[in-house]
Amino acid sequence: MGRDQEQRPRVLLLGVIEHAHSAWASVSEIAEVVTPASTNRAEFLSEAASGAFEGCVAAYRTFDSFSVTGKIDVELLAALPSSLRFICHNGAGYDQVDVSACTARGVRVSNTPTAVDDATADMAIFLLLGALRNLAVGMASLRAGKWRGTGEGGAAGPALGHDPQGKVLGILGMGGIGRNMARKAQAFGMKIRYHNRTRLDQDVEEALGAEYVSFDRLLGESDVLSLNLPLNPHTRHIISRREFAKMKPGIVIVNTARGAVMDEVALVEALDSGQVSSAGLDVYEQEPFVHPGLLANPRAMLVPHMGTWTVETETKMEEWAISNVRMAIESGRLRSIVPEQKDMRGE
Ligand SMILES: O=CC(=O)O
């Protein structure tokens, strides 16, 4: 190893760069990239203990790297070298990272907001239309060689669907994805209501044509409820039995956020009882496990977490996360530090 190379900062690569190869090449020009050999958490912890990651300043991580490292929590952080100051997550949702534990160790965390907004909101609209129209039922019948199949009571085909026009879309969580979805749903003539931790400015509300309502009003007045909020200890199971009971009978549920914002067992019960007429889901509590009650219910339209699964969006996300790594190395700052750490001082 030459003298120059020895002095370069080290970067830990947790996961694979699939698309943004030239952006990553620009990182490898200024840093030595360290790739773990481990394939599971136990191996990763002992690899870390062996000193293999010594000197790493920043880590780039993907959603799928969870299968190797598990959650970035107190135990994992304790195993990583004290040189590690930045964790750059590729994704909008960073529930795989215990941000409080990172803050306590002075490790700053970034995510990729806005890069995911269009693709995730597009998926939410697809699921909204599909669930409103009972498309999953018809599609399953066709594949089973039964054309539209036989509906309840021997009726021909699935139950008739519903048009979005004039229906109330309740959006829980009005960040970038929620706002993007509101704009798109307006084009389908939906009435938008929302609930969020913080109310939007009046001019933003007006531009979106979105009315702010209490959580209970959102539950009671929505024809379709879309979950667009991050998963954290405050939002885990924010939708459970009590909340389903407050909803309009026959409501449609759309979830493109994280499975665990909703109690999946309660959702299965609500679908079985008809309280929820149909659901469009891209996310599940224990991915890749899907609750058998959802698999068995043809009124659940199920997608295997593909909200950002497009060439353009996956590329944008990688480029965004890589730009955080670059900034961390070059200036000791992050482009998009997570909101919980907004007040953390830079170096
Ligand atoms: O699930 C996708 C993301 O968090 O970006």
Image: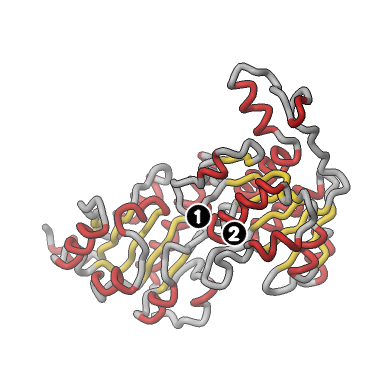
* Nearer to me, 4 or 156: 156
Q: Quadrant of the C terminus?
A: bottom left
Could you tell me residue 339's position as x and y percent?
A: 54, 73
Kindly indicate the quadrant of the structure image that contains residue 2: bottom left
Left or right of residue 78: residue 17: right
Residue projecting furthest to the front: 153
Q: Looking at the image, is 341 positioned above or below residue 244?
A: below
Kindly indicate the quadrant of the structure image that contains residue 122: top right
* Nearer to me, 34 or 162: 162
Left or right of residue 297: residue 288: left
Could you tell me residue 190's position as x and y percent?
A: 83, 49
* Nearer to me, 50 or 135: 135
Left or right of residue 71: residue 214: right
At 73% from the left and 40% from the top, the residue drawn is: 129
| Amino acid on which the number 1 mark rests in the picture | Glu
At 49% from the left and 70% from the top, the residue drawn is: 337
Kindly indicate the quadrant of the structure image that contains residue 294: top right
Q: Earlier in the sequence, mark 2 or mark 1?
A: 2
At 75% from the left and 41% from the top, the residue drawn is: 132
Near mark 2 (Cα within 10 A), the count class, few <14, some 14-19 or many ≥20, is many
Left or right of residue 299: residue 67: left
| Amino acid on which the number 2 mark rests in the picture | Met
Color scheme of the displayed model: secondary structure
Q: Pointer 1: what residue?
A: 285
Q: Looking at the image, is 184 positioned above or below residue 8?
A: above
Task: Describe the element under mark 1 as helix, strand or loop.
Answer: loop
At 49% from the left and 45% from the top, the residue drawn is: 290
Task: Describe the element under mark 2 as helix, strand or loop.
Answer: loop
Q: Does the residue at mark 2 contact the one at mark 1 (Cβ under 8 Å)?
A: yes
Q: Pointer 2: what residue?
A: 262
Could you tell me residue 59's position as x and y percent?
A: 33, 63
